[in-house]
Image: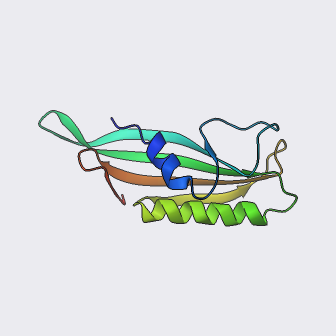
Amino acid sequence: MVDLHPVIAALLKPVGRVELAFPDMSARFPLLTITELSSASSAIYDGEERLTDVDWQVDVWDDAQTPQRCVQLAGQASDALIQAGFTRYFGQLMRDAAIPQRYTMRFRGRLDNKTMMMYRS
């Protein structure tokens, strides 16, 4: 099993600050959070996991009064993960009472654990 947290954080770092935890109102915005949703073996060779299907959620948070910057950053984050081999299968501007702007996206990919190549699944 491979920990993709540092890999995805590095991919998103040019877009903005990345954290693993849900932000609170004292956080500095804009902010991206990443969450692993699932990780399942899809191929095992000679007793070793070779391919892993992964799903990740990326949330873009902003405290601006309008969603424009949040949506723009979400587009940049989506581009970065798609170029890395992921497929985005969900994206939506969400309403959150605590933080004015939130854009949520979900991504899927198939990771070759040996080569660290990501394939679209």
Q: Nearer the viewer, residue 14 or 91?
A: 14
- Image position of 8 (left or right of 76): left
Image quadrant in which the N terminus is located? top left
Q: From this view, report whether residue 87 is shown above or below residue 116.
A: below
Q: Which x, y percent locates residue 83?
A: 44, 65
- Image position of 118 (left or right of 103): left
- Residue at the limit of the structure toward the right, as seen here: 65
- Residue at the limit of the structure toward the front, as seen here: 14
Q: Which x, y percent locates residue 50?
A: 23, 43
Q: From this view, report whether residue 48 is shown above or below residue 119.
A: above
Question: What's the residue at 59%, 55% (across, down)?
Answer: 105
Q: Quadrant of residue 78?
A: bottom right
Q: Which x, y percent locates residue 41?
A: 30, 40
Question: What's the residue at 40%, 39% (across, down)?
Answer: 39
Question: What's the residue at 79%, 62% (across, down)?
Answer: 67
Type of colouring: rainbow
Q: Quadrant of residue 101?
A: bottom right
- Residue at the limit of the structure toward the left, as seen here: 46
Image quadrant in which the C terminus is located? bottom left
Question: What's the residue at 76%, 49% (across, down)?
Answer: 29
Label tally: 0
Q: From this view, report whether residue 18 is shown above or below residue 1.
A: below
